[in-house]
Amino acid sequence: MTQQTDASELEIARTNSWVLRGIVFFLMVIAGITIWMTNALLTERYSINALNRAELRLALYSGNIVSELQRNSVVPLLLSRDPALIGALNSGDYLATSQRLISYQGEIGSASLMLLDEGGRVVAATDRSRLGAAHRNDPYFVEALRANDTVFTSQQLDTGAYNFAYSRRIESEKRGIGVIVVEVDLKKLENRWRGTADAVLVANSEGRVILSTESRWRGRTVEEALKSTSPPSAVVRAIQATADWSSLPDESYFGHQTVLRRDGRIPFQGWKLSLFSSYASVRERVNGVLALEIMGFALLLALTFYLFSRRAVSRSLLFQRESAGLRRLNERLEREIAERERVEKTLEVAEQTLAQSSKLAAMGEMSAAVSHELNQPLAAMKTYLAGAKLLLQRKRPEEALSSFQRIDDLIERMGAITRQLKSYARKGGDAVEPVDMRASVSAALAMMEPQLRLRHVEIVSTMPRHEVYIMADRIRLEQVIINLFRNALDAMNEQEEPVLDIFLSAGKFATLTVRDNGTGIADLDALFDPFYTTKKPGEGVGLGLAISSGIVNDLGGRLTARNAEDGGAVFEVQIPILKETAAAE
């Protein structure tokens, strides 16, 4: 009976496996068809939108050019009839003429205005640096003298840019006495076009590019411009990939790039405007929708697997009855793990208690130096009080106030010393926060200052100018640094000129190096073992470095030691630095 049941279950499992494979294959086919149709439909729809936007920008750019030209075209006619300009040309007095043209320029918004006498010399201009220049052979002067109306000329400069100008002859008593020139500022339109993702060019009736977002295209024919070396942009690289634009449709595909070209006519002297746009945004929008569809099918497939897995779970319950022994074993292991965790917590509390005891022991060692630091201001306060009393008896209260102010400064100094002791004696917490390691080193130095000064220790400190932030408990970090300073101070007991080097650097890790010129380390292997000490009985229990090493390890760093080549010991603390400090570095 058991063998028949096993065979039946095996047959059911095989049937379920084939059903699952069929459902997965069906979902894959449906997903492929759906994604293919969505890609085709959305690509067409978004492409039409891109074409419409390109047509709109083409009309807008063309309108801006025509508007700028029309606005400046009427200016020569008005200025040619200005009595002040005519009078200046007849009299030869041009003192106020340039200022008059400057005032006109502010109202008109043209690039520049020039007044030329009948010899082609600039007698007045908005740009005073052009005064006196000769333009006798320039097209806008020659053609203006020949014509009876306003003439428009375009002239390519040495820089490759084009100069566009309207000019008109000024007459007095039916005789030509000069020419007024109005230069049109079409360069500002080029600057606006460069702020977009499109490549734009304007060609004149001869087919030469006179305006373009790419300066190297100016002065060439459209075909020459498109064949020239292009700047490194996605649109222009795609344009460069084609050899003959005249045979391509409006939408062109070059490898993995899609480029749209739109041409339009400007109703001015046969000019043409060409716009080149990228289809990258179309592909991005389509890909976004396709990603959502793929995610939906993935969720549907996951749901299918989940439903089939439910049946497998129901069958697995039969095997769970046979795993009672394993569960009992797991429960026993869990009890052992809980007991181990309890012991670890007890050890952690003991470690914190030992650390606090070490700190209090350090405070005891520092008490003599602190007492010396407090006696000095107390003696000074006594002297100032006696002086103030004498000044008050002599009715000199202003000078007595100065003594009281000095006494107040001494009280503030004594308060700073006691606050440092109080902060160091407080127990550290478990919470970590961003801590500037420079501030912790400075606080530790301030705590050790009385002992260092009493021993006449020379301190050589090198700190970075910027903040060095790490994630740490400030109190515990300062405890580590003070332990290192105390060990260095003890190691230099027999040195006549003790020197303590402190170097802090910031890279991938915040690295604090403490070096002394003492006797060095006798046993590096046992240095960080608990209760290892080289001090005399009663001077230490050998827990300072062990506790410090544990604190640094909890912060994700490490504490190492070595002997210096020229004598003394070197301790190095490395703690992972915050990303903000690494970016600033």
Image: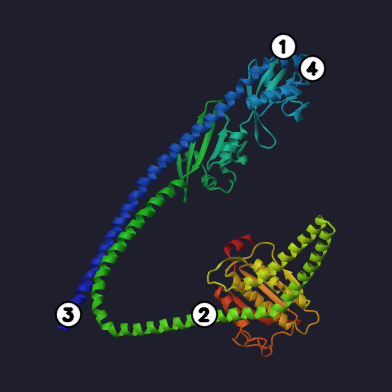
Residue that appears at 60% across and 82% down: 546
Label 1, residues with CA under 10 Å away: few <14, some 14-19, many ≥20: some
Provide residue 211's location: percent of width, then percent of height.
59, 35
Q: Quadrant of residue 429?
A: bottom right
From the image, tell me which residue sits under label 2.
Answer: 349
Residue that appears at 69% across and 67% down: 416
Secondary structure found at label 3: helix
Give the residue type that dot 3 points to: Thr
The reply to whether the C-beta atoms of the residues labelled 4 and 2 are less than 8 Å apart is: no
Instruction: Name the quarter where the C terminus is drawn.
Output: bottom right
Secondary structure found at label 2: helix
In the image, residue 230 sits, relative to residue 60, either above or below, namely below
Left/right of residue 16 with respect to residue 294 in the rendered view: left
Give the residue type that dot 1 points to: Ser
Task: Kindly report the distance in space between the C-alpha atoms of the residues bearing marks 1 and 3.
Answer: 122 Å
Of the residues tagged 1 and 3, which is closer to the observer? 3
Secondary structure found at label 4: loop
Give the residue at the far front of this rendering.
Answer: 393
Task: Kindly report the distance in space between the C-alpha atoms of the residues bearing marks 4 and 2.
Answer: 102 Å
In the image, residue 205 sits, relative to residue 348, either above or below, namely above
Can you tell which mark lies on residue 5?
3
Task: Kindly report the distance in space between the C-alpha atoms of the residues bearing marks 1 and 4.
Answer: 14 Å
